[in-house]
Image: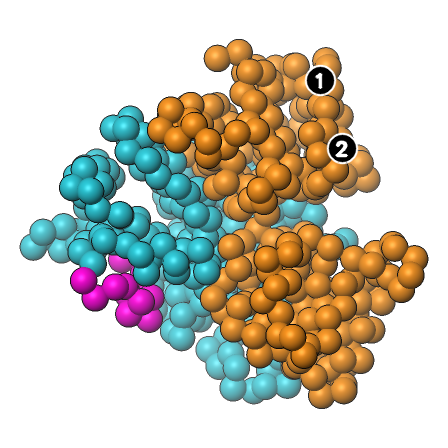
Chain colours: A orange, B cyan
Amino acid sequence: LLTVKALNRIRAADAIVHDALISAPIRALFPPDAVVIDAGKRGGSGTSASQDEINTILVSLARDGLKVVRLKGGDPLVFGRGSEEALALAAEGIAWELIPGISSANGAAATALVPLTHRAVSRSCTYVEGHERALHRLDWQALVALGGTWVFFMGKAAARDIARSLLLHGADPALPMAVIENASLATQTVRARTLGDVAAHGYVPQTDGPGLVIVGPTVALFHELHTLVEELNPHEHPVSDLSGLGA
Amino acid sequence: LLTVKALNRIRAADAIVHDALISAPIRALFPPDAVVIDAGKRGGSGTSASQDEINTILVSLARDGLKVVRLKGGDPLVFGRGSEEALALAAEGIAWELIPGISSANGAAATALVPLTHRAVSRSCTYVEGHERALHRLDWQALVALGGTWVFFMGKAAARDIARSLLLHGADPALPMAVIENASLATQTVRARTLGDVAAHGYVPQTDGPGLVIVGPTVALFHELHTLVEELNPHEHPVSDLSGLGA
């Protein structure tokens, strides 16, 4: 799902600074003589580099005269901190360009068959961060009143809290929630449950990978799309489980 | 900004049904012997084909045993009717796959330098349709209460109504609005104004092309990013005009 433009930049790069989420097939495209830095690992410590450390690395490589590609999973301007890095580079007088990517919401929607909008079903789509700290700051009442499709980035761990907060602010317990893990990878899993079910019983992670939570009426279309696709090609999406929608 | 996966499918296609928004450089990638149908033009009438007509064309081509690519600008599952077409095909027993694309919001954000989220500035992003009919159905109070970044797809023509409705429901008149026309094309224009200014004086279209409206505090970052980029490379973004933000 890399864009042609991003691929061309990778092929011409002297140095590539990438996230932990970059998959092996994409790493295989890196030029053999490029400096490759995994920002998901810091020195020998195994922890991720901080944003300040990444900014320093990018500035330092560019100052050495290298053409640097900063490669992120998803889109750099949707919870990707692309604008923070761009500002840090610009403040140092270093030229850059931003290349958009397939946001994990769009990628997950297409590979898991969960439309983000669908005429007469959902007419808006809201992206929020799905980790605990961000959820505490969210205006749940406004979100529920707005309706449409709600996408919680990295919301897997807080799936039960998300369901409970939505119900507390008036969402329909029958509204479906999909949790998509390892979106668009071979290890992708999709689970669809009602909000009431997740609030009562929680969500059991299927993998160690990242997980996106999508809530809204279009998730029920996923059920319809999925059943049709399974009939046409039973081996295409083997790990999806829709039993939680009771259909 | 085509993905590598989409490019591979285009190269292997027997037939391509595309929208009016597909640019000439992408059309140049079509296989020379492929059947090409422009769904933006119907027969000799010059009007767009209806969704039913497109569904019929897709089913008919697939029944003829052709490998068909349905090519859309943006992402098929964000106001793209991809799920409608997928359901129509599945109902006829025709197998398909969905390949995500760069949504026009993500494409416009990166090429116009308007982040959709930015830490401590905007923590959510809501996509809504920006045409008159959709705007009448929108819960403006909830949208304003939710805050974050608001993206109105195809909102150019209604920019003044959007600004007025937002102000009427309590949005800050100093909040910036960006209108991005022909996003990511050579003819791209970006104009940033405050909501108060657009509500009072309207928005003057710069081109005949489609226009996306982005409202929220990150648009002010655009100003900062843009000024820095102009200093570094004065010819990169010649048609942007930021004077409306008074900075």
Determine which residue is flagged by label 1.
A199
User: Dot 2, crowdedness within 10 Å: few (<14), some or many (≥20)?
Assistant: some
Task: Say if A167 sits above or below A112 in the image.
Answer: above
- Residue A141 spot, x, y in % from top left: 67, 28
Task: Say if A236 sits above or below A76 in the image.
Answer: above
Q: Secondary structure at mark 2?
A: helix
Identify residue type, mark 2. Ala
Residue B26 magenta-highlighted: yes
* Magenta residues (range): B19-33
Determine which residue is flagged by label 2.
A157
Label 1 – label 2 distance at C-alpha: 13 Å
Q: Nearer the viewer, residue B169 or B117?
A: B117
Q: Earlier in the sequence, mark 1 or mark 2?
A: 2
- Residue B207 spot, x, y in % from top left: 34, 69
Identify residue type, mark 1. Ala
Residue at figure coordinates x 91%, y 61% from the top left:
A44
Circle 1 or circle 2, nearest the eye: 2
Task: Say if A5 sits above or below A200 in the image.
Answer: below
Q: Secondary structure at mark 1?
A: helix
- Residue A146 spot, x, y in % from top left: 56, 32
Give the chain letter at badge 2.
A
User: Dot 1, crowdedness within 10 Å: few (<14), some or many (≥20)?
Assistant: many
Residue A37 magenta-highlighted: no
The prevailing secondary structure element of the residues shown in magenta is loop
